[in-house]
Amino acid sequence: MSFYYIALLVFGVLVFGAFIFITWYGIKNLFPGSGDPANVAKSFSEIIKNYSQLILGLFVVLVITALLLEKIVSPESGLSIISLIVGYILGSRINLMGKQ
């Protein structure tokens, strides 16, 4: 097994663990008996959607980068996919910042 795949596995486990911890912490401490449950659920589902989109995008970029470094994927195809994913992530972040 290559170093890149082990690093990706460790990254995936750490990010997933951090995501689970943040959601658990957010449920227990951010919304203890405050406000309308529908508003809390709506805001929490938006948070989960945004962060999961970002985490999955970063993971795919790292996987493609590892495949590029191992010379499994050609640079012509790998770099175009990376630029597409990064552009989508940045575009969705800018769109979300404009809504506030």
Image: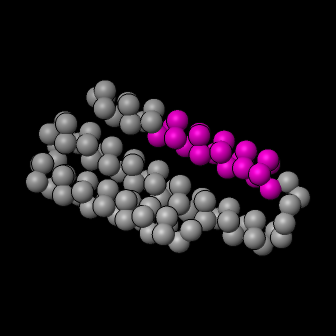
**Residue appearing at x 46%, y 54% in the figure:** 54
Q: Is residue 36 left or right of residue 72?
A: right
Residue 23 to residue 93: above or below: above
**Residue appearing at x 65%, y 45% in the figure:** 22
Looking at the rendered image, the quarter that the C terminus falls into is: bottom right
Q: Position of residue 11 (x, y in %)?
A: 45, 36
Looking at the image, which is closer to me, 60 or 46?
A: 46
Q: Position of residue 33 (x, y in %)?
A: 89, 58
Rendered image quadrant of residue 38: bottom right
Main SS, magenta residues: helix
Magenta segment: does it hold 22?
yes
Q: Is residue 17 left or right of residue 94?
A: right
Residue projecting furthest to the right:
33
* Count of numbered marks: 0
Question: What residue range appears in magenta?
Answer: 12-31
Q: How is the image coloured?
A: one colour
